[in-house]
Every structure is written in structure tokens, then in C-alpha cells.
Image (spheres, helix red, strand yellow):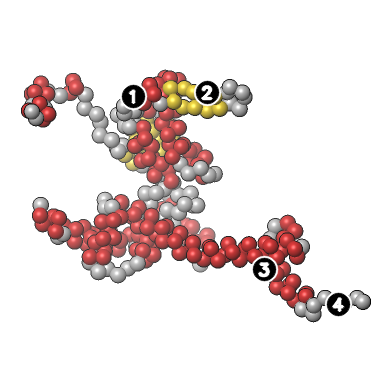
């Protein structure tokens, strides 16, 4: 059987999906591992590390991603310019203020395998700081991120706060 | 007195050059480089024959895992129940089923899910 015929048979198997993910209240690292799997095609049974079977991912609301703990203040992104004394560092908070997509982009970029496919995968990733994006017609599926949205103190009723389990421990 | 070389010199060399045909640079023409390249290539080939088995097994496991995740089931649960059900398909065949016969794979996943619900842990619940 000619390879041409084979390719036309498997067109639907190899068709790339377009996923839309809302990054609101998603933890950066957990969302990144989730997205990396989609970009690499590690959700498909035809996965092969050398074959490019990944999907497209559009992430909106990246300005609302979450870091746990004190990472906004403590986490540093470092790079060296190559000149003497050229070690530059920027706090996660400042980087996020500069470009609200960059924190997530760096997390995903760092989690992909360090080979030439990394650039191909990154080209299929689209990040938008708010909910506006130009790929509405392409989206095939909308996914919910791996983290449940955080419940704020204002969202709890007074009765729930009153009956919080730890209150009657001692 | 001028002596000739060993009789089978050209034959021995031809054997090595046959192995290094298509190698890069002078490794394919120059005997002193070719013999070294041939020995190294044979070492790599020996190691590659062992690695091939491991690499393929890990690839099959990744593929089965991906297919099991599509059926909302972790790999470990799927394989464990295959063993308990005495389904004697190996990982190579299971991964091929996942690619070429997704419905058959889905049927196996349903079987696994049913077997899981009959387990001791669920009986205790």
C-alpha cells in the first residue's frame, strides 16, 4: 500500500485539536504540566517522542494565574547577558506586571523537553492576558484547568465560618 | 629482503570496509580510522539491541496510559485489572489495539472497570 494512501486514511487520527483553557485561579505549575501534555500529544495513543502529534492550545485570562505561598515576591527569574556583572534578575511580581503572559510561558517552556521540537510546540501555544482571543472559529474543545477555583473568605457564609471544623478541636 | 604482506590482507580489510560503508569522513576509506569506527559501531549496535526492548516497552506503556486516560482510568488500574481478568494480551498488542481498534480497547477498559468495582476494597465500602 502506498504511503500516500495511508496518509489519507489517517487524516482524522492526525488532525490537530484546538483547546481553549481559562487560566483564571489556576496555579502556574499545575496548569503548565497540564498544557505540556496537550502540546506534546501525550493524550493520544499514537504518541511518539520523535513524532510531532501535539495539539494547539489557547490560554485566556493569564493575568489571573495564581502562585501559592510567597512566590510572587520571592521567586526570581534570572538570566545572564554574557557581560561581566550581567546577571539580571526580576521578581515574579514584576515580570507579571511587565507582561501578564510571561510567567506562564516560561513555566511551560521550561517543562518541555530541551530539543528542537520545543520550538514547534511553543508555536502552537497562544497566550492572552484577558478573555479576548482571535481563534474562536478554530476552537474544537474547551477544557477546564486542573485546579478548582479558589474560594475567598467573602464567599463563605457566616454560618460556615462559625462551624469551621478546627474550632471545636480542643 | 622484501616480504609480501599477509595473503588475506585485502580480504580482512574488505570485511571492515564493508561495515563502514557510508560512514562520515575518512572513516569509510582510511583503514586505521575505519577499524576504530567499525568497532565502535558494533558496540553501539550491541547496546542498541538491548535498549530497543526497553525503549519499546516504555513507549507501549505511555501509549496504553494515554488510551486508558481517555477512558478515565489510570494505567495502573487498567493493567492490574487485565491481570486479574486473565486477559493475556501483552503491552505491544494492547497499545496496537488502542491505536487501530479503539472500540476493542474501550471494551477492555469497561471490563476492567467492572472488575475494579467487584474488588475487595469496594466490597468493604
- Mark 2 and mark 4 in contact? Answer it, CB < 8 Å: no
Q: Which residue is mark 2?
A: A88
Residue B44: percent from left, percent from top: 58, 62
User: Which residue carries the number 4 mark?
Assistant: B4
Same chain for the residues under marks 1 and 3 in the image: no
Q: Secondary structure at mark 3?
A: helix
1 or 3: mark nearer the eye: 1
The answer to whether marks 1 and 2 sit on the same chain is: yes
Along the viewing direction, whichever of B54 and A101 lies nearer the viewer: B54
Look at mark 3 in the image and give the residue it sits on.
B19
Please tell me which residue lies in front, A116 or A143: A116
Q: Closer to the N terminus: mark 1 or mark 2?
A: 1
Gap between marks 4 and 3 measured at Cα = 26 Å
Instruction: Identify the element where label 2 is drawn.
Output: strand
Distance between mark 4 and mark 1 Cα atoms:
82 Å
User: Do marks 2 and 4 share a chain?
Assistant: no
**Number of numbered tags placed on the structure image:** 4
Image quadrant containing the N terminus of chain B: bottom right
Real-space CA distance between mark 2 and mark 4, rounded to the nearest whole angstrom: 70 Å
**Quick check: do tags 4 and 1 share a chain?**
no
**What residue would you read off at disc 1?**
A70
Q: Is residue B10 above or below residue B113?
A: below
Marks 4 & 3 on one chain: yes
Chain to which mark 4 belongs: B
- Residue A63 picture location, percent across and down: 37, 24
Tell me the SS state at disc 4.
loop
Amino acid at each position: 500500500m502506498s504511503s500516500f494512501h495511508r496518509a489519507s486514511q489517517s487524516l482524522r487520527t492526525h488532525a490537530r485539536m484546538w483547546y481553549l483553557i481559562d487560566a483564571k485561579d489556576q496555579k502556574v505549575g499545575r496548569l503548565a504540566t497540564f498544557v505540556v501534555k496537550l502540546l506534546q500529544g501525550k493524550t493520544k495513543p499514537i504518541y511518539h517522542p520523535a513524532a510531532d502529534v501535539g495539539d494547539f492550545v489557547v490560554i485566556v485570562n493569564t493575568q489571573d494565574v495564581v502562585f501559592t505561598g510567597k512566590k510572587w515576591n520571592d521567586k526570581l527569574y534570572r538570566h545572564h547577558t554574557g557581560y561581566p556583572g550581567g546577571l539580571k534578575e526580576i521578581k515574579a511580581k514584576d515580570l507579571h506586571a511587565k507582561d501578564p503572559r510571561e510567567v506562564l510561558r516560561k513555566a511551560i517552556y521550561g517543562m518541555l523537553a530541551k530539543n528542537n521540537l520545543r520550538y514547534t510546540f511553543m508555536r502552537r501555544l497562544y497566550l492572552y492576558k484577558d478573555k479576548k482571543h482571535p481563534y474562536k472559529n478554530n476552537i474544537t474543545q474547551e477544557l477546564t484547568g486542573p485546579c478548582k477555583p479558589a474560594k475567598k473568605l467573602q464567599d463563605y457564609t457566616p454560618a460556615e465560618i462559625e462551624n469551621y471544623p478546627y474550632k471545636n478541636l480542643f | 629482503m622484501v616480504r609480501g604482506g599477509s595473503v588475506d590482507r585485502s580480504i580482512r580489510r574488505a570485511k571492515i570496509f564493508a561495515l563502514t560503508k557510508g560512514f562520515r569522513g575518512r572513516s569509510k576509506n582510511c583503514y586505521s580510522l575505519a577499524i576504530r569506527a567499525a568497532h565502535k559501531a558494533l558496540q553501539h549496535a550491541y547496546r542498541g539491541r538491548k535498549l530497543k526492548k526497553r525503549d519499546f516497552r516504555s513507549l507501549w506503556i505511555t501509549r496504553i496510559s494515554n488510551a486508558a486516560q481517555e477512558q478515565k482510568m489510570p494505567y495502573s488500574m487498567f493493567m492490574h485489572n487485565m491481570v486479574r481478568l486473565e486477559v493475556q494480551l501483552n503491552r505491544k498488542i494492547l497499545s496496537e489495539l488502542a491505536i487501530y481498534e479503539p472500540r476493542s480497547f474501550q471494551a477492555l477498559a469497561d471490563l476492567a472497570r467492572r472488575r475494579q468495582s467487584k474488588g475487595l476494597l469496594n466490597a468493604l465500602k
